[in-house]
Image (cartoon, helix red, strand yellow):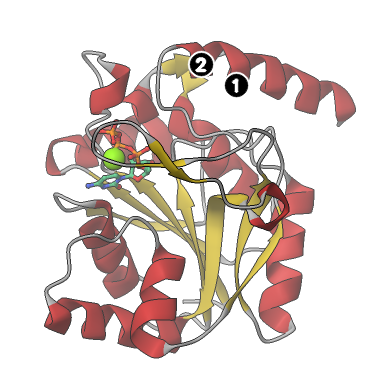
């Protein structure tokens, strides 16, 4: 493994998309959604890529995505798990030997080179980091009966995106501790490193275009953003 390894996650079921095929393989401007983030890492200074997908989609990814589009940096396609964090864990096992990992949702196609560059820079500055953006809406904490119980000051709130980036040994040891704890409320990797290692993560500027495709209307938005990114190239 090289110095920087990207782990691209494409093993989810996409239940909120309510589509027959997993959202990471739905067609977006003529190509599967996951093509775009693989293409971005292929064109970046990242050394290698691990693609994580469902057991039934490994052969499809190898033949119809990695070989077809000549993604030479993809070292291997590995099987994911039932939860996102198990998919990450399998990706980390396959990335053994890397110095740093950038963990990215394959459902975020609109990632650009500047954003990847900012991640690499912070890793080299010695930080664990994630990209994110200041929230635009007021955010409320609500109780079980849907009454607001708190309105945190908006200028302290950021929505978190991916890539999330770590020195390899740190994130692996945080995952080992997470496994021993038996916790199951994990939604991202910065939570794991903060909770189990007590290491702070730096939240750096992402991009409002770096959306996660989650529900059907997101595909239309992503297509507009991709077109804009191509025009700017
Ligand atoms: N993911 C994964 N393995 C899982 C669950 C999620 O690799 N067991 C990946 C997804 O493929 C996606 C990213 O993690 O690229 C972010 O997850 P999310 O948007 O929640 O995707 P899904 O879990 O597929 O969607 P949903 O929650 O609507 O079922
Ligand atoms: Mg999910």
Residue 37, image x, y percentages: 55, 41
Identified at 37% across, 79% down, the residue is 195
- Residue 30 in view in this figure: no
Q: Nearer the viewer, residue 216 or 158?
A: 158
- From this view, report whether residue 102 is shown above or below residue 11: below
Label placed on residue 219: 2
Disc 1, SS: helix
Q: Position of residue 70 (x, y in %)?
A: 51, 40
> Is residue 230 depicted above or below 190 in this figure?
above
Q: Which residue is labeled 1 in the image?
A: 222
What residue is at 44 percent from the left and 35 percent from the top?
107
- What residue is drawn where x is 22% and y is 32%? 13
For mark 2, give the secondary structure. Answer: helix
Does 227 sit above or below residue 137? above
Between 16 and 38, the one lying in front of the other is 16
Q: Position of residue 150 (x, y in %)?
A: 48, 48
Report if the beta carbon of the residue with label 2 is closer than 8 angstroms to ligand 1. Answer: no
Q: Quadrant of the C terminus?
A: top right
């Amino acid at each position: 493994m090289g110095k920087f390894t990207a782990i691209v996650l494409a093993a989810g079921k996409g239940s909120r998309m309510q589509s027959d095929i997993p959202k990471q393989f739905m067609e977006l401007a003529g190509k599967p959604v996951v093509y775009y983030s693989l293409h971005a890492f292929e064109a970046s200074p990242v050394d290698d890529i691990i693609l994580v997908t469902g057991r039934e989609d490994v052969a499809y990814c190898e033949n119809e995505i990695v070989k077809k589009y000549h993604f030479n940096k993809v070292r291997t396609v590995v099987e994911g798990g039932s939860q996102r964090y198990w998919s990450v864990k399998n990706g980390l096992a396959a990335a053994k030997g890397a110095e740093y990992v950038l963990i990215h949702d394959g459902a975020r196609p609109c990632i650009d080179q500047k954003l990847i560059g900012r991640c690499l820079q912070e890793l080299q500055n010695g930080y664990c980091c994630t990209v994110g953006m200041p929230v635009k809406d007021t955010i409320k904490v609500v109780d079980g009966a849907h009454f607001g119980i708190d309105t945190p000051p908006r200028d302290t709130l950021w929505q978190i995106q991916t890539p999330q980036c770590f020195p390899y040994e740190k994130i692996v040891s945080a995952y080992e501790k997470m496994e021993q704890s038996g916790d199951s409320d994990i939604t991202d990797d910065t939570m794991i490193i903060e909770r189990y290692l007590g290491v702070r993560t730096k939240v750096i500027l992402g991009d409002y275009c770096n959306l996660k495709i989650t529900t059907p209307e997101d595909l239309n938005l992503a297509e507009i953003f991709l077109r804009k990114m191509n025009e700017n190239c």
